[in-house]
Image (cartoon, rainbow, N blue to C red):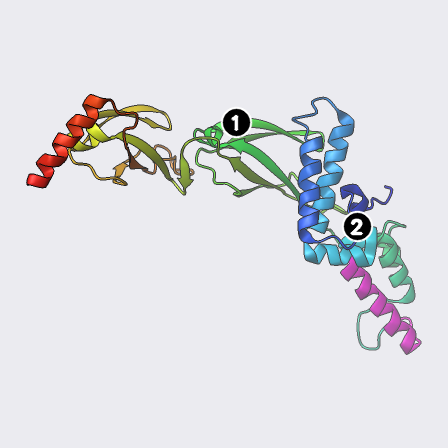
Amino acid sequence: MAFIDYYKTLGISKTATEKEIKDAYRKLARKYHPDLNPDNKEAEAKFKEINEANEVLSNPENRKKYDKYGENWKHGEEYEKAQQHRQKSQYSGRGDFSGQQGFTGQDYSDFFESMFGAGAGRTSGRSHSPKFKGQDYHAELHLDLKDVYTTQKQVLTVNDKKIRLTIPAGVENEQLIKIKGNGGEGYNGGPNGDLYIKFIISNHSDFKREGNNLYKEVDLDLYTAILGGEILVDTFDGKVKLKVKPETKNHTKVKLKGKGFPVYKKEGKFGDLILTYHIKTPTNLSAKEKELFQELKKLRHHD
C-alpha cells in the first residue's frame, strides 16, 4: 500500500494546531460524507482517508509517533526495541546475549522484516511478528434535537461496509459510542479496531435542553396574569392546557413533570419541562382602556 501523507490528506501543514486539525477534518468530513455522496465510491474512499488521518493527527501521542516513524508509526516502539537488541548484539560481538534468550543478528533481520512487511521471520522456523489491533476509526453523526427525542435506526456506510445502528432516545450532544470491531483491519491476525461515533446534536427548537430537562419561556398577557385563566402551552410532543393562578408574578416558574426529554436507555422515563412566564405589557391602548387604567390606579392609591 502506498504511503499516505495524513497532513496532505487534511490539507494542513505539519505545524498545524489541534484546532486547525479539528476544523479541517470537520470541513472535509461534511464534504465527503457517504450520506451526502450516495453511490460515490471516490467520496467513500476519500472519507475513509480523512477519518484515518484524523484518527492519527488528532491524538497527540499518535501524531508524535507518526511524525517520527511515518507510515510505520504503529510499530515505532517495536522498531526501537529491535534496534536496541541489534546494538547490544553488535557491541558484544556475539550472535546472542550471554546467559539470556535474545536476538541474533539474523533474528533482528527477521523481526524487522516481518514487522514492516519485507518478509516473514525465518529464525527457528517461526515468525516473530506480533499481532496488532487494527486502527480505531472516529466519525461524527449530525442530528437535530427532534431526531433523538425518539429511538431510531440508521444505516451508516463506513469503508464500504454498511452498519445498522440503533440510536436510543435521549442521546446527548457530543456523546461518544463505540461499535466494537468496525474499525481498521487487524495486523498479522490481530483483532479489528473499533468505530467511535460522536453525536453532534443541533437545536432549532424553542426549547433549551439541560440533561433530561427542557426549558421554555412563555408569554403571558397582563389580564390572565392578574385574573388567572387557562392557556395552551407547547411541549416537545404537543400542546397542553395549563391553568394560570390569579396574580401570577413575572418570571414565575412552572414545572410540568415528565414533559421533558427522554432519559437515555431508560424506556418510558422523561425529565421535566420548566416554563418561565414573561408577562407582556399591553401597548397601543385605546382612550377607553387608558381611562380604565386611570380609574384602577386611583382605586389602588385609595387603598
Q: Secondary structure at mark 2?
A: loop
Residue 91, above or below 171: below
* Amino acid identity at mark 1: Lys
Question: Where does label 2 land, which residue?
Answer: 13
State the mark number for residue 120.
Answer: none
Q: Decide which of tag 1 and tag 2 comes sooner along the chain.
A: 2
Q: Secondary structure at mark 1?
A: strand
Q: Is residue 7 magenta?
A: no
- Does residue 136 appear to the left or right of 254 in the view shown? right
Residue 141: give x, y in percent of width and height.
Answer: 59, 35
Q: Quadrant of residue 60?
A: bottom right
Q: Residue at x 25, y 37 (%)?
A: 254
Residue toward you, 302 or 165: 302
For the residues labelled 1 and 2, the Cα–Cα distance comes to 39 Å
Q: Residue at x 91, y 66 (%)?
A: 105
Question: Where does label 1 land, which residue?
Answer: 153
Residue 283 shows up from this direction: yes
Residue 31: give x, y in percent of width and height.
Answer: 70, 32
Q: Residues within 10 Å of mark 1 (few under 14, many from 20)?
A: few
Residue toward you, 17 or 276: 276
Residue 241, above or below 200: above
Residue 127 shows up from this direction: no
- Looking at the rendered image, the quarter that the N terminus falls into is top right
What residue range appears in magenta?
75-95
Q: Residues within 10 Å of mark 2 (few under 14, many from 20)?
A: few
- Does residue 270 appear to the left or right of 115 in the view shown? left
Q: Nearer the viewer, mark 1 or mark 2?
A: 2
Residue 55: give x, y in percent of width and height.
Answer: 69, 47
Q: Residue furthest right?
A: 93
Residue 275: give x, y in percent of width and height.
Answer: 30, 36
Residue toward you, 32 or 87: 32
